[in-house]
Image: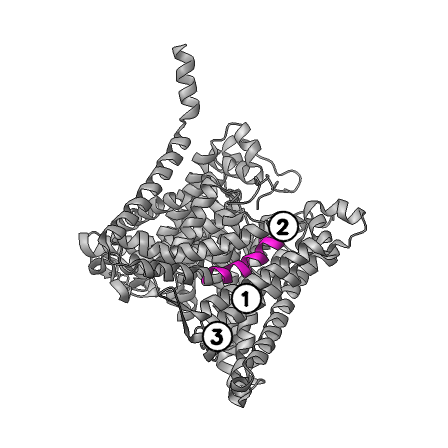
Amino acid sequence: MAVIRPSGDFDRNYNQDMALIRKPWQWVLLLLSIGAVATSPYWAPPYVYIKANQIGYTLIAVQGLNILTGFTGQISMGQSAFMLAGGYISALIVTYLNLSFFIALPLAALGAGLVGLIFGIPSLRVKGFYLAMATLAAQFIIPWFTLHMFPEYLGGQNGIISAPVPVIGSYEFNEPARFIHITLFVLILTTIAAVNISRSRMGRAFVAIRDNDLAAELLGVNLFGYKLRAFFIAAVYAGLAGALRAHSSWQIGSEMGYDLSESIIFLGMLVVGGLGTNLGPFLGTSLIILMEDFSNIVGTKVSAVMLTGMTERVLTSFRPIFFGLILMLFLIFEPRGLAYRWQLFKASWRLRPFSH
Amino acid sequence: MKNTLRQRIGEQFSLITLLLWALRVGVFIVVLWGSINTLASGRYEASTWINLVIAGLAQGSIYALIALGYSLVYGILRFINFAHGEVFMAGAFTSVFVAEALERSGFFPKYPILTFAILLIVSMTSSTVVAVLLERIAYRPLRNAPRLVPLITAIGASFFLQYTFRGLYGSGFHTYPEFGQLWGVWNIAGMDIQIVQVFVFLASLLMMAGLYLIVERTKTGKAMRAVSEDKEIAALMGIDVNRVIVITFVIGGMLAGSAGVIRGMYQPQGIWFFMGFHPGLKAFTAAVLGGIGNIPGAMLGGLFLGVFETVGPTLILQGLGIPAANQLKDAIAIIMLVLVLIFRPQGILGEKLAEEKA
């Protein structure tokens, strides 16, 4: 995606060429928006920072999926199961090894990554839809594992264990207003990593595999190795997201929304935002999560004019219906997602007042 | 000489082949070990196993009916209709309301056979409508898009259908009225065989025979085969490709609808908006197992999966001492799918999958 730049704007040295953020005002905007999110507990209503926290950890999982599905072209429907693995590992480490959450977090990411590697093995032989079905296995096996194995540690049939509140010194991150700082920090790290992966040798190999795996192999890309690396990275991201989610809601269990539909929603967020772009996950995740509340409002309005018995039904179904519709409409009318629209918008703005 | 030998060994035993062989041997050992353990423990008699197999055949014939829908569509469009499970759900879920109404009005106890026919018609109609709408709205605009795109659309459509039906009919469970005549037991050669299982099996065989006649003996069937061979050439021969595709979806929808009613006869409980997902997944597994795009393959795959799924957890997993083996049914189906995809992607009967696979 070549960036269209106004005439006279060119790089004078390699540092400028490599810079992710080119202009001082871009730095200002970036720092301002990070600052706005970081300070939101002090000036915004609770809704804002609670949602920001939720968007934050979901975003990390979607970024991981983006590396796997968007860049490498390997469709995965197991992302929320890897989140579950990450959350459990982190909660167990903190509870039983008495380590700090901030040590458990990278360990959980690593553990989830290893789990992801196992489920990535089928990518050796199968692709496309078949691979999606193979990754679905994760969605069955991991929750089964947490429900039936080691009941004394994993919560057994009850399926819920508590995830201790992270602590630094005596400062407890026990509510979204405080936890959002951890989420934001991790999100910044994962974003930097994702952006740099996408423009490194590994990222180029991923894209080559996505575009034509046969050609990529002929050019010397080790298909199996790079596919597994993509699975590992995606699962590491999911592990981070799962640990964050577990510790911000104080508990984790397989019945708490780590099921297949969650994985599908991640996929939908990615498609709506734009596959294979670093901006896509941000746009898609925010849109879908905010749409959830929007659809509740619309649902209330719609159900007001419907039969009285229907109200509750319509409300509970509205969000998935909206989601399915948006996903289908995006794929039919704009399969490149919101990120592409944003690109077009920026380009037209840069070229103003000339249309070509 | 030594050098070439080493090269040859290196070629034959690269890391990946080694890994695959290790996996093969591992799976084989696990299956063998589990089976031997269970059989040696002598917990079950021979008649138990036979009953399990018959139950598996009944279950498998329902999978086979749904699997045919996947296979037909794949044969023609080379893409997997992930929302086909929801087509099945649409039929079963709609007809359960008719069944409940008929039972309340007292019509059902009087004319059970007529009721069955009505249910079949209702279920097939609603499934067919859903399938055709799906094709028209979600798949036709994307027919020339990259492969990944209609796939994700199908996932979105499946989600949309599930929750639209939930919005329409509510999220509660419904139950089919029981056909009393079917719930007896036949005693054949000293074994108790449930009549309903025989009925399910025969009804499904009848549907499949009908499908086979349509595909092999009618002009439409010939057109379908031609389109699955080559869309463009078929169009040049004067076949209306769009019409054939719609007909394919209609047939798939009718089979799924009939599967819905048959499932209602066999397992009256648990009719709700999410009921299409697992059978859909299993049916897809069955279709792949038999060789996707292959009609006898889908039937065979369905039956095999049904038997494997009922016998497998008891035979293999209990021998390994895994707790709650029966809850792993779904995982077993998926694992089997993965193993089939890794070791024999063309399935039992299928020809070699070309590059076109998904």
Stretch of the chain drawn in magenta: B59-83
Residue lying at the far front of the rendered structure: B189
**Residue under label 1:** B203
Q: Which mark is residue B75?
A: 2
Q: Which residue is mark 3?
A: A316
SS class, disc 3:
helix
In space, the residues marked 3 and 2 are separated at their CA atoms by 37 Å
Label 1 neighbour load within 10 Å: few <14, some 14-19, many 20+: some
- Majority SS type along the magenta span: helix
Foreground of the two, B237 or A222 = B237
Marks 3 and 2: same chain? no
Where is residue A157 shown, x and y percent of the image?
27, 65
Q: What residue type is disc 1 on? A: Ala
Q: Are marks 2 and 1 on the same chain?
A: yes
Residue A116, above or below A300: above
Observer-nearest of A206 and A152: A152
SS for tag 1?
Answer: helix
